[in-house]
Image: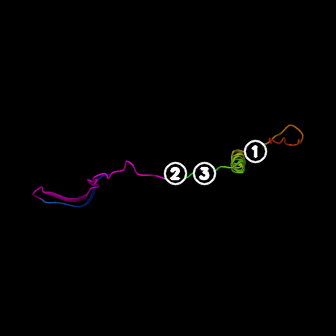
Amino acid sequence: MMPQIDKWSSTRARRFAYEAQLEVVPDFTLPQYKGIEVKKKSAEVTDEDINKTLDMLREQRAEFVDVTGRALQMAISAS
């Protein structure tokens, strides 16, 4: 982040003064992290979950195209 200059002034004697705000990273000691136990949550995915997601993706990606030059036909189901 760039310094933010808040107040500045100059005089005829060519003195220049300003206040700036700077973002600095604090010094700190990293605590011991090796050996910490972490519990992993597992998720169970069912066939129903997969089918719902696939149906949603089919709806999102569907393209509707105007068809001219032929008679009306029945749509062919993918399933």
Residue occupying the far left of the picture: 13
The C terminus sits in image quarter? top right
Residue under numbered circle 1: 64
Cα separation between marks 2 and 1 = 43 Å
Residue 66 horizontal side relative to residue 21, left or right: right
For the residue marked with disc 2, what is the amino acid?
Answer: Lys
Q: Secondary structure at mark 1?
A: loop
* Image x and y of residue 33, in percent: 36, 50
Q: Which residues are magenta?
A: 12-38
Q: Is residue 24 magenta?
A: yes
Q: Earlier in the sequence, mark 3 or mark 1?
A: 3
Q: Secondary structure at mark 2?
A: loop
Q: Which residue is mark 2?
A: 40
Q: Compare residues 17 and 51 and report the one nearer the observer.
A: 51
Residue drawn at the location 46% of the way across and 52% of the way down: 38
* Corner quadrant of residue 72: top right
The tag earlier along the polypeptide, 2 or 1, is 2
